[in-house]
Image (cartoon, rainbow, N blue to C red):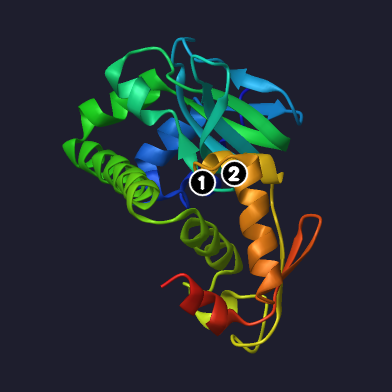
């Protein structure tokens, strides 16, 4: 089903990958954009499927993962509203190297690769902006690999909790008015998925949570994590 041109254009205009595209370019892309509604647990594509284009999450949550030779799932990325995926394999014209599955009921926009290629052919500046978006994604993946290689499991988990609360962002984006006071975080996905994303086993993640609780840095209530003292938690990761 084709997306409503104006609503798709408005949303695409706020996505980092297309933010600097001209209004005319976005309008042409929006005309060919399709809406995809997927339910929680649905698979959008499997590893090895041909790439159809670039996907943008309007709402919901998408997990990118692959299975190791032993059948263990490795979560590569968890995507939320406004994030895009599928660009790299689209440009390389190779099959998908990961599987995409919905972790919640989601609405996606699919921009066909033909529409992207035509935009690039008509405006070299558009190509540069697309490359900038891919470079940002690569930079984040390199940072993830560096984190896995040089930081302990405890440091990785604390970093994840702080980012989830927005402590690394401006203070008013965090759930707490007092940055040094207690903060409640609702984990967006199951702990097993978080463990895989952080390159930890579920058992290791559980031990870290237990140890942080014993130190009275956090309290764990299912998916709800209460950070008892943000400054002490920050210092524990240094």
Contact (CB < 8 A) between labels 2 and 1? yes
Check the image and report above or below for 116 versus 96: below
Asked if residue 111 lies left or right of residue 39, the reply is left
Whether residue 182 sits left or right of residue 173 in the image: it is right
**Compared with residue 159, is residue 124 higher up or lower down, i.e. above or below?**
above
Which quarter of the figure is the N terminus placed in? top right
Query: What label sits on residue 226 in the rendered view?
Result: none
Whole-percent x, y for residue 169 in the image: 48, 73
Viewer-nearest residue: 199 or 224: 199
Q: Quadrant of residue 217?
A: bottom right
Q: CA distance from mark 2 to mark 1?
A: 5 Å
Question: Measuring 63% from the left and 82% from the top, which residue is drawn there?
Answer: 229
- Return the residue found at the far right: 221
At x 61%, y 75%, the residue is: 174
Quadrant of the image containing the C terminus: bottom left
Location of mark 2 (residue)? 195
Mark 1, secondary structure of its residue: loop
* Residue 75 seen in the figure: yes
Classify mark 2: residues with Cα within 10 Å, few (<14), some (14-19) or many (20+): many
Identify the residue under disc 1.
198
Nearest to the observer: residue 176 or residue 121 = 176
Position above or below: 76 against 95: below
Please tell me how many numbered marks the rendered image carries. Answer: 2
Say whether residue 7 is visible: no
Q: Position of residue 61 (x, y in %)?
A: 65, 41
Residue 104 sits in quarter: top right
Residue 110 place in picture, x, y as percent = 53, 27
- 10 Å crowding of disc 1: few (<14), some (14-19), many (20+): many
Q: Is residue 56 left or right of residue 228?
A: left
The kind of secondary structure element at disc 2 is helix
Q: In front here: 151 or 17? A: 151
């Amino acid at each position: 089903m084709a997306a409503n041109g104006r609503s798709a254009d408005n949303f695409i205009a706020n996505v980092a990958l297309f933010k600097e595209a001209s209004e005319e370019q976005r309008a042409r892309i929006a005309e060919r954009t399709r809406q995809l509604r997927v339910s929680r647990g649905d698979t959008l594509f499997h590893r090895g499927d041909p790439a159809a284009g670039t996907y943008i999450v309007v709402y919901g949550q998408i997990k990118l993962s692959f299975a190791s030779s032993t059948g263990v799932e490795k979560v590569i990325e968890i995507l939320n509203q406004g994030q895009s995926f599928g660009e790299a394999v689209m440009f390389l014209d190779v099959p998908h190297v990961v599987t995409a599955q919905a972790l919640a009921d989601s609405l996606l926009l699919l921009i066909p690769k033909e529409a992207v290629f035509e935009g690039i052919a008509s405006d070299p500046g558009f190509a540069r902006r697309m490359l900038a978006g891919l470079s940002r994604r690569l930079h984040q993946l390199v940072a993830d690999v560096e984190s896995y290689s040089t930081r302990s499991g405890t440091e990785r988990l604390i970093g994840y909790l702080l980012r989830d609360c927005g402590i690394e962002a401006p203070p008013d984006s965090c759930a707490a008015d007092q940055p040094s006071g207690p903060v409640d975080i609702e984990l967006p996905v199951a702990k097993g998925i978080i463990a895989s994303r952080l390159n930890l086993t579920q058992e290791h993640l559980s031990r870290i949570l237990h140890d942080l609780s014993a130190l009275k840095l956090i309290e764990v209530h299912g998916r709800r994590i209460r950070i008892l003292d943000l400054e002490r938690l920050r210092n524990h990761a240094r």
